[in-house]
Amino acid sequence: MNDDERLDDLQFAGLKILQKNTGFRFGMDAVLLSDFVRADASATVADFGTGTGILPLLLWGRGKGKRFEAFEIQPEMADMARRSVEMNGLSEYIHVHPVPVEQAPALLSPGSVDVVVCNPPYGAPGATLHNPHMDKDLARHQDARGLKPWFTAAYRLLRGRGRMALIYPAPMMLALMNDLSRAALTPKRFRLIYPREDRPANLVLVEAVKDAKPTLQPEPPLIVYQRNGAMTETLRKIYHLET
């Protein structure tokens, strides 16, 4: 472990993860996405923009997938993810590729993936201020092409009727669904996330299916905190906390 890193106990399935002391660290959005994802225990899962490798670890712990192919453009972050995988004894099942997401179809066979998961950068091109910390900036900001190349790569990798699951800012839900549809990834299921019951939704979970018919199923809203600041019972269950 490097001097600028720390080892965090996920308090779930005996898993641990390396993270930066001052750099980018995973948040609640990764936990919520891992709960939302539908994947069989035998599934092959690709993670686009894995960061520290949190999603493959959480999905493994939840029994959602057997083989994971994780892609991360930042070499240092990818190396940290790889070491976390080794530390948990999961190198046989989770493979970290230090390459841009767009190169994924060159490394994996077309139609070889059951589910693609993605907790992408939320910052639309030119819409938000950049962060002086390079790892945080890359983790939070899209380039000029947005996520369209990621959706193209997902379509090529997914088997017929394969699924892609994402978490994204709720105000940008329409643009996200339009871009997915243009890539022949049809939005089929979504769940809005509310910080409190009296606040507007700030995030949305979306599942799209390759080459599917255009029907969309809303799921019950997910409210994160009670008015007194305590976790809701729904969130506590997602975190596997006693209620």
Image (cartoon, helix red, strand yellow):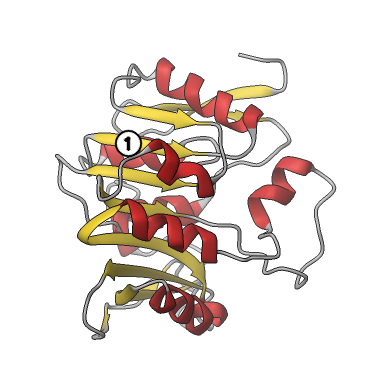
Q: Is residue 53 left or right of residue 13?
A: right
Residue name at image x 66 percent, y 60 percent? 142
- Percent position (x, y) of residue 188? 27, 76
Residue name at image x 32 percent, y 22 percent? 90
Nearer to me, 51 or 6: 51
Which quarter of the image is occupied by the N terminus? Answer: top right
Q: Which residue does the numbered mark 1 point to in the structure image? A: 68
- Percent position (x, y) of residue 161? 19, 64
Looking at the rendered structure, the secondary structure element under dot 1 is strand
- Percent position (x, y) of residue 181? 39, 78
**Callout 1: 10 Å neighbours few (<14), some, many (20+)?**
many
Q: Amino acid at mark 1?
A: Phe
Indicate whether 177 appears above or below 153: below
Residue name at image x 61 percent, y 66 percent? 146
User: Is residue 49 visible to the viewer in this orientation of the structure?
Assistant: no
Quadrant assignment, res 133: top right
Residue sitting farthest toward the right: 132
Nearer to me, 32 or 97: 97
User: Is residue 101 visible to the viewer in this orientation of the structure?
Assistant: yes
Indicate whether 53 appears above or below 93: below
Indicate whether 39 appears above or below 213: above
Nearer to me, 15 or 95: 95
